[in-house]
């Protein structure tokens, strides 16, 4: 290990390290002021707006619509951004180490590393399927589809996973390509129905919407293997595939267990109601990475709220005041099905209406503007380009 790097904080400043700077980590950074010496670590230079990444598949959005430069956002909050992955956290010593071997000291650490794609141990996923978890990955799927759909050769696309992401992926492919002849779309889900954890209504509505097209829904069928030419289901059935999209959900990254924040590999890090690690009192774990005492869905708006709460609790801890519990708000979820339908999910109740697409767009526009307040030329330019893009999409030219 290199000698710990210590930036020269003012004597009254607590040193805060934030590991991961997407929804949860970035919002935590924005909640801490210059009274703290804050360093933010992330290997990627771009903040990514994940709730709309399915729209990259159809080209309804471009990568630049969904990304913001982290360095600029962190600097605007008055903090220091280090573009590096954190490879180890030693909470007892109050140090962390980055991939390039730099050691950094902290008084408080906020861990907001999200999750990583889960292959569920299925053979061939990494080699033969395209993952669907980041802006870059969804843009790559969009490019592959555009090439495949040229000409008139019959094409078969398989989406593995009939959860939120799989349903949104299917909707986007239909948005762009549903009039193409000789196109077969398969969606495969191990559970009893599409988005069965949310409501049976979405499964029924999607089945009705896809009736005019060659869409085949395979539920209750786990995938056994992905091959270069298709997908093999348990029981032996094979689906030919020119492109396989994997939306298999997420699992905890190895860092959580390695840093002794999670008891076992692949497990999220247990926290108390104030988001403080159950294992280390100087560490807060927020966003998808956290296992709360009362589990909540892993969603962006909860990650943002947890970022705010963790920043407030670091301020309280530094002032030796009692910490406050995190209270998740009950924000409904909007699930887009291309331009065919949008579902609003509130608890177990579901409302379906294509006009709700404007609601999803508004959430995106407003939250992006909150993350990147239009006070600089860059932010104003970004906001203008997002609004123009949205207007074009919602009001298509004749
Ligand atoms: C396809 C898809 C669609 C979704 N749609 C919706 C939706 O419509 N609505 C909704 O509310 N939610 C949605 N979600 C869920 C939402 O995106 C997550 O809940 C949210 O991103 C969690 O935020 P986070 O900050 O905890 O983690 P993430 O957004 O995953 O960010 C984690 C960050 O940590 C960084 N990181 C990871 N490891 C390290 C390390 N070792 N060192 C430093 N940095 C590291 C990563 O680079 C990343 O920037 C969707 C998710 C996906 C994948």
Image (tube, helix red, strand yellow):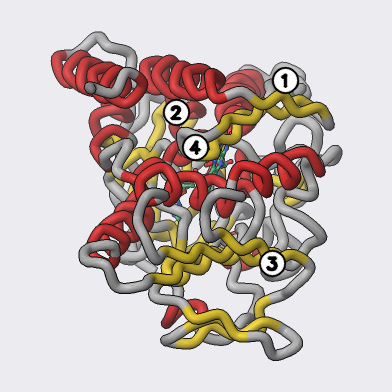
Q: In the image, is 137 to the left or to the right of 311?
A: left
Q: Nearer the viewer, mark 4 or mark 1?
A: 4
* 378 vs 36, nearest the viewer: 378
Q: Which mark is residue 51?
A: 4
SS of the residue at dot 2? helix
Residue that label 1 marks: 329
Q: In the image, is 96 to the left or to the right of 198?
A: left
Distance from disc 4 to disc 3, alpha carbons, whole Å, reads 25 Å
Instruction: Report the residue at 42% width, 82% height from top.
Output: 127
Q: Quadrant of the C terminus?
A: top left
Whether the residue under disc 4 has CB within 8 Å of ligand 1: yes
Q: Nearer the viewer, mark 4 or mark 2?
A: 4
- Residue 255 locus on image (x, y percent): 56, 63
Q: Nearer the viewer, mark 1 or mark 2?
A: 1
SS of the residue at dot 3? strand
Q: Nearer the viewer, mark 1 or mark 3?
A: 3
Could one spot residue 292 in this view of the protein? yes
């Amino acid at each position: 290990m290199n000698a710990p790097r210590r930036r020269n904080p003012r004597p009254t400043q607590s040193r805060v390290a934030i590991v991961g700077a997407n929804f949860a980590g970035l919002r935590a950074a924005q909640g801490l002021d210059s009274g703290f010496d804050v360093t933010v670590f992330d290997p990627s230079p771009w903040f990514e707006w994940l709730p709309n990444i399915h729209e990259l598949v159809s080209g309804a959005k471009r990568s630049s619509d969904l990304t913001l430069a982290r360095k600029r956002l962190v600097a605007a909050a008055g903090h220091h951004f280090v573009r590096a992955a954190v490879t180890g956290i030693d909470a007892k010593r109050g140090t962390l180490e980055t991939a390039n071997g730099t050691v950094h000291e902290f008084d408080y650490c906020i861990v907001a590393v999200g999750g990583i794609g889960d292959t569920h141990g299925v053979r061939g996923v990494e080699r033969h399927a395209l993952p669907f978890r980041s802006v870059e990955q969804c843009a790559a799927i969009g490019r592959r589809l555009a090439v495949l759909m040229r000409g008139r050769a019959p094409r078969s696309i398989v989406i593995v996973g009939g959860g939120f992401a799989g349903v949104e992926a299917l909707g986007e492919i239909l948005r762009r390509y549903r009039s193409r002849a000789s196109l077969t779309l398969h969606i495969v889900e191990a559970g009893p129905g599409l988005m069965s954890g949310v409501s049976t209504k979405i499964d029924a509505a999607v089945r009705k919407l896809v009736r005019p097209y060659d869409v085949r829904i395979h539920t209750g069928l786990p995938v056994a293997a992905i091959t270069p030419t298709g997908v093999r289901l348990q029981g032996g059935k094979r689906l030919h595939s020119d492109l396989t999209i994997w939306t298999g959900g997420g699992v905890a990254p190895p860092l959580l267990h390695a840093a002794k924040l999670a008891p076992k590999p692949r497990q999220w890090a247990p926290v108390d109601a104030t988001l403080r690690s159950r294992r280390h009192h100087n560490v807060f774990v927020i966003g998808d990475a956290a296992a709360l005492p009362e589990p909540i869905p892993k969603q962006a708006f909860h990650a943002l709220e947890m970022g705010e709460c963790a920043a407030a609790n670091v301020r309280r801890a530094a002032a030796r005041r009692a910490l406050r519990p995190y209270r998740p708000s009950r924000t409904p979820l909007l699930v887009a099905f291309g331009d065919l339908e949008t579902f609003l999910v509130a608890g177990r109740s579901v409302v379906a209406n294509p006009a709700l697409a404007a609601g999803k767009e508004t959430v995106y526009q407003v939250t992006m503007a909150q993350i990147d307040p239009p006070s600089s030329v860059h932010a104003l330019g970004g906001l203008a380009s997002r609004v123009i893009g949205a207007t074009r999409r919602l009001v298509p030219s004749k």
